[in-house]
């Protein structure tokens, strides 16, 4: 029996993180330079129903039956089994690898879940459609993030720029003019669940103020969508700066993120902001193609542990 494999890209949120949890829109895009991969191979020597899972990056090497319900990889596999009504799958090994940094705002958890769901369902002879892959990955996202919006699993599943509103039909964005961004990693792990939880506590304590912040972000997101769809890329830079300013008020930025966004602007970026949960992880800067490498070099010199140059809408 052949091995079955699937991969899924990373992602960045260009506009709207945190507010998206509260019903406002956000814009996200795939990042194909980093990926998660899952490979499922039959293991005829093992007992029927035995699924062995390996993920070296997180030190996991165990059988499915020995893993708790809260283990995300196990949850992804069990989600597929439950959806397909399979109680005793053929004995197999699942190996997961990823080049996406963990807890960095690049959608590592969602990418791994999507890759696992696709590879495992294909191994069982029933490759699942994107809608089901997305739904199953979202269930796993709840383990990662507590109260996720669903944007990570959506943009990773469809591998297209999306305009996302929680609970509404998916809208893929038509980018009239592709544009370049540089992603800079602070190297500081930042589990999204923590920052999302802290924002929720602050919102509960001061709903009027936080709803106003979210409304402001909503306006930025809609302006960014109009700019992307009309090709007015030059408008995106100031919108990034404005979005970052509000995220600072939400207290989800940090000294390292603020420093890298400033360095990027000084090196020629048209705008910059944190992306993802914040408190570490990554930032993103809008750049002209000819200045991308210079901005990336400046970020590295300023302490970014890695940079990625990617093109949105290509």
Image (spheres, grey):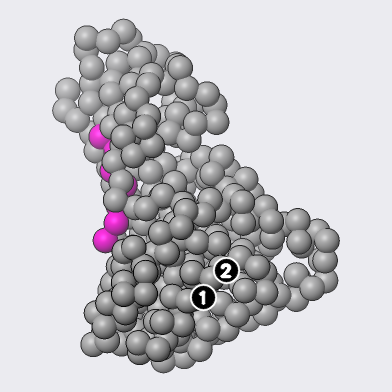
Helix, strand or loop at disc 2?
Answer: loop
Helix, strand or loop at disc 1?
Answer: helix
* Residue for point 23% across, 21% down: 42
The percent position of residue 96, horizontal first and vertical second, equals 31, 37
The CA distance from mark 1 to mark 2 is 7 Å
Crowd band around label 2 with a 10 angstrom C-alpha radius: few (<14), some (14–19), many (20+): many
Asked where in the image residue 167 lies, by quadrant, the reply is bottom right
Asked where in the image residue 24 lies, by quadrant, the reply is bottom right
Specify whether 35 is left or right of 206.
Answer: left
The furthest residue to the left: 2
Q: Is residue 165 above or below residue 244?
A: above
Q: Quadrant of the C terminus?
A: bottom left
* Residue for point 52% across, 24% down: 68
Q: Is residue 140 above or below residue 110?
A: above
**162 and 285: which one is in front?**
285
Residue 201 in view of the camera: yes
* Residue for point 46% across, 57% down: 188
Q: Are marks 1 and 2 in contact (CB under 8 Å)?
A: yes
Predominant SS of the magenta segment? strand
Q: Is residue 154 above or below residue 229?
A: above
The percent position of residue 47, horizontal first and vertical second, equals 31, 8
Indicate yes or no whether the magenta region holds residue 62.
no
**306 and 214: which one is in front?**
306
Asked where in the image residue 182 lies, by quadrant, the reply is bottom left
Indicate yes or no whether the magenta region holds residue 34.
yes
Residue 53 in view of the camera: no
Specify whether 90 is left or right of 73.
Answer: left
Q: Which residue is mark 2?
A: 253
Specify whether 112 is left or right of 17.
Answer: left
* Residue for point 59% across, 49% down: 193
Q: Which residue is mark 1?
A: 258
* Residue interval drawn in magenta: 33-39
């Amino acid at each position: 029996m052949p091995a079955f494999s699937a991969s899924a890209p990373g992602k960045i949120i260009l506009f709207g993180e945190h507010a998206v949890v509260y019903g406002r829109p956000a814009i996200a895009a795939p990042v194909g330079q980093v990926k998660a991969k899952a490979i499922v191979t039959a293991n005829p020597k093992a007992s029927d129903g035995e699924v062995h899972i390996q993920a070296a990056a997180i030190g996991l090497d165990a059988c499915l039956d020995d893993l708790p319900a809260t283990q995300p990889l196990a949850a992804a596999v069990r989600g597929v089994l439950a959806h397909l009504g399979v109680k005793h799958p053929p004995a197999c090994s699942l190996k997961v690898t990823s080049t996406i940094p963990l807890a960095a705002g690049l959608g590592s958890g969602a990418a791994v879940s999507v890759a696992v769901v696709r590879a495992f369902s294909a191994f069982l002879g029933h490759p699942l459609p994107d809608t089901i892959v997305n739904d199953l990955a979202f269930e796993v996202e709840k383990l990662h993030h507590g109260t996720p919006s669903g944007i990570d699993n959506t943009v990773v599943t469809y591998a297209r720029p999306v305009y996302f509103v929680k609970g509404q039909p998916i809208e893929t964005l038509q980018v009239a003019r592709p544009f370049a961004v540089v992603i800079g990693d602070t190297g500081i792990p930042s589990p999204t669940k923590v920052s999302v939880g802290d924002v929720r506590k602050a919102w509960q304590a001061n709903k009027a103020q936080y709803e106003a912040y979210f409304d402001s972000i909503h306006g930025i997101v809609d302006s960014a969508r109009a700019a992307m769809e009309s090709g007015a890329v030059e408008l995106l830079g100031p919108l990034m700066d404005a979005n970052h300013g509000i995220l600072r008020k939400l207290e989800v930025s940090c000294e390292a993120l603020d420093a890298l966004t400033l360095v990027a602007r000084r090196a020629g970026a048209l705008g910059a902001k944190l992306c993802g949960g914040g408190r570490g992880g990554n930032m993103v800067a809008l750049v002209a193609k000819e200045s991308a490498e210079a901005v990336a070099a400046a970020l590295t010199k300023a302490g970014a542990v890695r940079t990625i140059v990617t093109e949105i809408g290509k």
